[in-house]
Image (cartoon, rainbow, N blue to C red):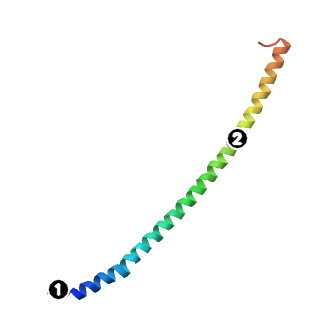
Amino acid sequence: MSDGNGEKRWLTWLVRVIVPALIAALWLSLSAQLDDLRCEVREMRAEVRDELKSQRLVNREQDGRLARLDAEVGLLRDDGRGD
């Protein structure tokens, strides 16, 4: 015959000790993974921000060159040496 009281104690122990411990371990694991993802996102944002700043500088330099070339072409046209 099965001992109903022993089974009840086992289930009670399982519910009161093992299940909360498993939930806590899962929570800690997920929390650590979330922290890692947050750090990765911060790093990626910083990289993108730096790349955008770099690209803006390149664009400003190119805009300055284009403005100088436009001015030179305008001068050549005014002098009648260009079209």
Using residue 63 as the reference point, say whether residue 27 is left or right of it. left
Q: Quadrant of residue 83?
A: top right
Quick one: label 1 or label 2, which is nearer the N terminus?
Answer: 1
Residue 65 position in % (x across, y down): 76, 30
- Choose between 70 and 10: the one closer to the eye: 10
- Identified at 54% across, 64% down, the residue is 35
- Identified at 81% across, 22% down, the residue is 72
Q: Amino acid at mark 2?
A: Arg
Image vertical order of residue 1 relative to residue 69, above or below: below
Q: CA distance from mark 1 to mark 2?
A: 78 Å
**Crowding near the residue tagged with mark 2, few <14, some 14–19, many ≥20 C-alpha atoms within 10 Å:** few
Q: Amino acid at mark 1?
A: Ser
Quarter placement of the N terminus? bottom left
Image vertical order of residue 82 relative to residue 51, above or below: above
Q: Which residue is mark 1?
A: 2
Using residue 20 as the reference point, say whether residue 60 is left or right of it. right
Image vertical order of residue 67 relative to residue 45, above or below: above
What SS does tag 2 mark?
helix
- Choose between 45 and 51: the one closer to the eye: 45
Q: Which residue is mark 2?
A: 56
